[in-house]
Image (cartoon, rainbow, N blue to C red):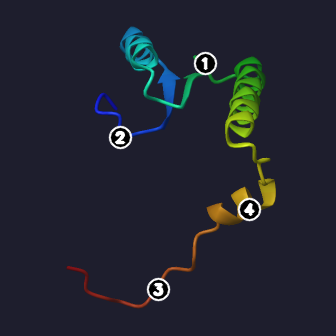
Amino acid sequence: MLEGKFEQLVLVNCCDSMRLVYDIVESMGKCKFLYMLDQPHEDNESEKVKFTGTIQRLNKAYEAYTRHVFDRRAFIKSLNTPEMNTEPYIGV
């Protein structure tokens, strides 16, 4: 990142170190899309609702950057894994 090899970066706001990385990358001005994603702190309904909003804000920011609308169908289709070969095989 410091060499300017990446134009887009999403960091997870999980600790002071990541916030420092964000500040450094932002100050360098080489990253065209930089986003800090807040991480849920607990596993409860309130945090799930809050995280949903966080993901939606990331989506809006990235749509504005790319000028493309998120395609939910294409996203879901990309999550489908091809069927695995269940026959015995040897892998090297």
The answer to which of marks 3 and 4 sits earlier in the sequence is 4
Compare residues 26 and 85 and report the one nearer the observer: 26
The answer to which of marks 1 and 3 sits earlier in the sequence is 1
At numbered mark 2, what does the secondary structure look like: helix, strand or loop? loop
Q: Give the Cα distance between marks 1 and 2.
A: 34 Å
Numbered tag placed on residue 5 in the rendering: 2
Q: Give the Cα distance between marks 3 and 2.
A: 37 Å
Looking at the rendered structure, the kind of residue marked 3 is Asn
Compare residues 15 and 66 and report the one nearer the observer: 66
The answer to which of marks 4 and 2 sits earlier in the sequence is 2
Instruction: Kindly identify which residue carries mark 1.
Output: 42
Q: Give the Cα distance between marks 4 and 2.
A: 28 Å
Tag 3–tag 4 contact (CB < 8 Å): no
Numbered tag placed on residue 85 in the rendering: 3
Q: Position of residue 16 (x, y in %)?
A: 40, 8
Compare residues 85 and 56 and report the one nearer the observer: 56
Q: Position of residue 67 (x, y in %)?
A: 75, 43
Numbered tag placed on residue 74 in the rendering: 4
Numbered tag placed on residue 92 in the rendering: none
Q: Give the Cα distance between marks 4 and 1.
A: 30 Å
- Camera-nearest label, 4 or 2: 2
The answer to which of marks 1 and 2 sits earlier in the sequence is 2
The vertical placement of 86 against 81, above or below, is below
